[in-house]
Image: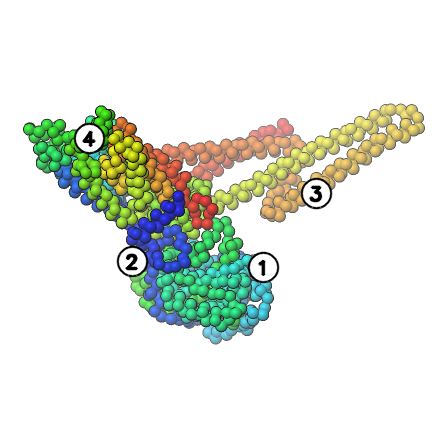
Amino acid sequence: MNRSPYITDAPTVSTIMFKVLLALVPGIIAYVWVYGGGILVSLTLATLTALAAEATLLKIRQRPVKPYLMDMSAVVTAWLLALALPPLAPWWLVIVGTFFAIVIAKQLYGGLGYNPFNPAMVGYAVLLISFPLIMTKWPVPLSLAEHPLGLMDQLHFIFSNILPADIKVDAITSATPLDYLKTQLMLKHEVASITQAPIFGTFGAKGGEIITAAYLLGGLYLLQQRIISWHLPTAFLAALATISLAFYAIHPAHFANPLFHLMTGASMLCAFFIITDPVSGPTTPKGKLYFAAGVGVLTYLIRVYGGYPDGVAFAVLLMNMCVPLIDALTQPRVFGHEKG
Amino acid sequence: MSEIINFASNLLRSALPNKAMPNGSLKDIFKFNGGVHPPEHKAESTTHPITKLAIPEKLTLPLRQHVGHIPKITVQVGDYVLKGQMLAEPEGTVSAAIHAPTSGTITAISEEVIPHPSGLPDMCITLTPDGKDTWAVLQPIDWRNTDKKTLVERLRASGIVGLGGATFPTHIKLRTNGKSNVHTLVINAAECEPYITCDDMLMREHADEIVKGIAIVQYLLGAEKCIVGIEDNKPIAASVMTKACTLACTQTCTQSPEISVKVVPTLYPSGDARRLIHLLLGTEIPNDKRSTDVGIQVFNVATVLAIYRYFEFGEPSISRVVTMTGNIAVPQNFEVLFGTPLKALVAAAGGAKSNTTHFIMGGPMMGFDLPNDLVPITKAANCIIAATPDLFAAPPPAMPCIRCARCADACPVNLQPQELYWFAKSDNFEKARDYNLFDCIECGCCTYVCPSNIPLVQYYRYAKSEIIAVDKAKEAADLARERNDFRLARIEREKLERAQKHAERAQAAKTEVNAETIKPEDGLASTSTEATPANTDKQAAIAAAIARAKAQKLATTHDAEVDAEVPAEKAVALPITAELKTPAAEAAELKAKQDKQALIAAAIERAKAQKLAAAQAGLAPKNIENVSATVQAEINKTDAIREKAKQAVDAKTLERKPSD
């Protein structure tokens, strides 16, 4: 019998997914610090929904449940989606989104390894199109709120949509900086004056930039652990920075500076956690560069000219469609061959 | 652009901790993509010197110990043979001789289980030693004063094959036919697989003889330069070899060519010939060429030593150094006579520990399970590892590929294993070939790093064998079609010729009749009219005869050509030709044949469509076994349809015959 090699040295899929979750922890801690404990509720809800949906679908598809649940990939999808949603999103929003991500975008395509689109981003896009109002209303950071909500108040709000008697919804929510910037620019205001609003921080969103920095930290951990390759985050951030710098250089009053784009919205989450999903991304080194650069450019264009405040989800889904082509056209040169 | 990417990639690689590239400081080394560095486990078996294993009670010598044709047995059961006497002579170009490892009696020529992944028995010569170990008369060769052609011819009888594991007959690699463009000889002493230390120990103990062997090979090839490539985990061997090379150079440097030792980083599979050439010289052998096409030839270090011993002492290839390691009392290297049963080797190493489950031949990256401990040690056996589940755990169940491309990062050939896996799994063989499946060296690096435990190499072997089988079938079908086309053309031509002949005869007859009816007017006219029909008839007959002869000649030459290629088909082809009696019967058969072909083609198309529909309906096969089962079912179905079609055709033909 020939089953060589007899030895292996590879992290299991579970280990890889577990490290991704671990890398998200700094971001989550920052999240709790900025927006309160509500995000933990969203994360729990998403996790439970994802596991239940995954188990049910595996059962229906007559696949072994335990090994596939243990691979933790469903949990990663759940966490990424929960972190992309507004922190005080109602409970059903989280469940609907996660359900879509796992059932439609993942299992119906054949489960782990077969989904052409990033499941978390499919879930996000479905919610954004279906419930645009809820999806674009973000709570103000605790530090800016007149009446910061406690954990119990947040729980109550998530599950019953009821706030303490003396607080109105408008008092705790606002547009995101990206959204605010867009609407204000339409009103012919200049970037410099718009960013004087209290929701803006030093680089990006007040509070949000801390979370973004924490994601960057987690991302560097993933790089160090060789869970992700450098190609994707580097190309994405470089493309986003380059295109925003070009626009900013031409018309600084009308376009935000590159640092703002890098530190706002889902940029860092996208760079290190979303486009690094191996299943729906390209596999060749060159292909990774093209793919990530494409996501970066599209994200910027959607942010600036599109109908939605942030463009990450649609940019990723659009580039997911190009992956087979990118892979086919970027085959590296094989040893001893003239060309690739 | 790509240079910048590579540069950036290397920069980041060097900045980040990298298990795969531990030795970045070695100079003048041209790295290849990927590679892996498994735990070496070499120290265990290098504590003892090479020990000569005692002559066992019985030696079983498989005829198939090398790549190529099996040799022709030259002894009979009951013959008494001397040590070093030839038992089987090479047959054909690519073949190697088998010699008696000791003196004794041939007690059997039979099928025995041999060390092969299939575990199937093969023809072996069994020798029962007499314990006297009497040498036959050996004939050393003064290689410096003998012409190269004679030396290579002598080497053909030496039984020496590549001892690194490839077992390619050595004399073929040294054939230069008077002109050689080989300028560099590379000696493969990398020994990159974990556990194996036979070459390491050989270099430590026999460096001088190895260097002498190198001089012989260099002389035969006319190679000015020689580089010995050794991995940096063998510092003792490297230093001993360097010393031996320097000594040889200072002694004979005026006319002797240059020999140097180059240390390469420990990175599997640096011992693969093409990878080693790249490491040492920076030359990438084009995928469709051999190393000799660019002036480089590679020999394993043990092979070179065997060549030296053959020329210096006349000793043919009768033993080799084998590493006995793994779950065994005293891991060490032995010089083992070919044909020695594995259990004798195991016993000599103090016996396998109690929890040993089986033995592996070769290293843990490319080796294979041995069927039992009775199999003989052969020329390919560089290492035997006593295996336990602790050392080599059964692989966990395979998970789906998550396209993480770790395999692509590890592939030393720079292939895209994840794509090849996908194509092999979905039986998309053409695509697999397009993605250079046949460049895969089956080194196992991809599986080594796969987080989903997918047996990638096995998928590639499956795809390769399928493609080769399809190619062979296609070749056969092409040949058959060609033959059929030719036959049809010949039938058509013969028919035309016959028709023409008929027409000519009819014309001739008519002219004759006409001539008879015309009354002669005068003597001159009468002689001319009398002569005309006779002339016409004669001329037509001659022309017809010439045409016939030509046609026959053409037919026989063409047949001969076809027959020469496929002798077995001759018997089939002849009766068919004989059957052709009347044009009517011919036409009927032709029609029937065409009908039948059309029906069969339709049936095959139908079966294909059914298969496609089944695949699309989500019944796509999950694994290789399922695939073969499905394919078998389809074949059965197609056969049934074909049978039905055949019956229908037969019935139709029967119906039609009377009316014809």
> Which chain letter matches label 1?
B
Q: Which residue is mark 4?
A: A193
Under mark 3, the amino acid is Lys
Give amino acid for label 4: Ser
- Neighbours of disc 1 within 10 Å: few (<14), some (14-19), many (20+): few
Q: Secondary structure at mark 3?
A: helix
Badge 1 or badge 3: first in the primary sequence: 1
Q: Nearer the viewer, mark 1 or mark 3?
A: 1
Residue under the image location 38 percent in, 56 percent down = B268
Amino acid, disc 1: Lys
Q: How far separated are the C-alphas under marks 2 and 1?
A: 54 Å
Task: Classify 10 Å Cα crowding around label 4: few (below 14), some (14-19), many (20 and above).
Answer: few
Q: Residue furthest left?
A: A166
**Residue ID at (48%, 74%):** B133
Q: Position of residue A186 (x, y in %)?
A: 24, 25
Q: Which residue is mark 2?
A: B390
**Between A36 and B72, which is closer to the camera in this rendering?**
A36
Chain letter behind tag 4: A
Q: Is residue B130 above or below residue B539?
A: below
- Looking at the image, is mark 3 or mark 2 earlier in the sequence? 2
**Residue A252 disc label:** none
